[in-house]
Image: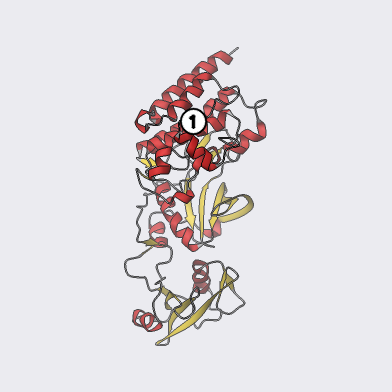
Amino acid sequence: MREREALRVDPSLSLMPWFHGKISGPEAVSKLRPKEDGLFLVRESIRHPGDYVLCVSFKQEVLHYHVIYQESKLTIDGTQYFYNLIDMVEFYSKNKGIIATTLQKPKEKEGTKSAALQLSKMGWLLDLSKLTLGESIGHGEFGAVFQGEYMGRTVAVKNIKSDVTAQAFLDETSVMTKLQHKNLVQLLGVILHNGLYIITEFMAKGNLVNYLRSRGRSVITTVELLQYALDVCEGMEYLESKKLVHRDLAARNILLSDDNVAKVSDFGLAMDNCQSIDNTKLPVKWTAPEALNSKMFSTRSDIWSYGVLLWETFSFGRQPYPKMSLKEVKEQVEGGYRMESPEGCPSDIYAIMRLCWEKDPKMRPSFHKLREHLQTELNKHESATEP
């Protein structure tokens, strides 16, 4: 892929610039001027809460089509169904169907900018006709993940069908366009279809936690575990240098490439330093105490999570804090409890975990410092295994 400009995280960028929210029919008519054929907007129905209205200008009149929300899908005529408004607008832009004319020109809501236009301008909008979708390889909280092919290259495709979630993922996409590092999963671009497709490089060996569980001690050496830990640390050191905080660092969010390189993925929560977040979404067992209590995040809270990830790695994918409820974890950790060393874990590695779990965030090492420690450990173990 050629060098492309990064997208700015811009709250006015919208996947649905034609969506005007709760406005009345007469307000919609006043906005659709001059009355060109195919000028349109979508509004929330005031008379039927939960439904929408597609307003289209045709032959100097504005036609209002009631969009019914039925069984988690949208329909105008009861024959053509859509997962979301983005799909519906895409369909009627190409097909007249039951409406008087195809949708030709969106009437943008004041203060919004078309994300499609911006993505296209910056070179991040990919061509749907060049994508072949293959089998489903996973299902995240936000939608399915597929293996696919784009212009001859194997890719991973995350499909987000909910238009609200797709809009939120625009921020993730904007963050990912700025980042390029051998230990971060690379964004290739997005396609606006069926909601949103986020296209990334394909990681053939799946996530680290499943990989460790399915192979175990008899197959994976300490040197390999250290290499994974170092890979993740280098990816995180890069994020640290960009002043970005991941906030959901865990072995499930580390993916392995065909040639066994570990890469950090899922920047869904990645933000500039110290932004707060909705507490219900926090992965308690991986989150630093100060982040759970004050909802303030920093690189040092990522360091705490990295310590938990190290524990997962050297326990071959065990669930952290085995047999403890989330409430117990929170209380015990607050009281000074720390997990014991995983069976067979080198004592120097466990010492690194304990550094990551210092109560005072300022006492935790930086990713830069951790990388130096891990590199020393890796060199030591490599020379010990040489014949």
Vertical position of residue 250 compared to residue 40: above or below? above
Quarter of the image for the C terminus: give it.
Answer: top right
Total tally of numbered discs in the picture: 1
Q: Kindly identify which residue carries mark 1.
A: 337
Report if residue 219 is visible in the image.
yes
**Percent from the top left, x then y, of residue 177?**
41, 48
- Seen from this angle, which residue lies furthest top? 387
Report if residue 179 is visible in the image.
no
**Percent from the top left, x then y, of residue 318?**
60, 34
Q: Is residue 14 left or right of residue 343?
A: left
**Percent from the top left, x then y, of residue 96?**
53, 78
- Residue at figure coordinates x 44%, y 49% from the top left: 279
**Percent from the top left, x then y, of residue 313?**
56, 31
Q: 208 and 6: which one is in front?
A: 208
Q: Is residue 112 left or right of residue 86?
A: left
Q: 105 and 287: which one is in front?
A: 287
Q: 242 and 70: which one is in front?
A: 70
- Seen from this angle, which residue lies furthest bottom? 60
- How packed is label 1: few (under 14 Cα within 10 Å), some, or many (20 or more)? few
Specify the color scheme.
secondary structure
Vertical position of residue 17 compared to residue 297: above or below? below
- Residue at figure coordinates x 54%, y 18% from the top left: 382
- Residue at figure coordinates x 59%, y 29% from the top left: 315
Vertical position of residue 377 compared to residue 262: above or below? above
Q: Amino acid at mark 1?
A: Tyr
**At numbered mark 1, what does the secondary structure look like: helix, strand or loop?**
loop
Q: Is residue 155 left or right of residue 15?
A: right
Q: 181 and 23: which one is in front?
A: 23
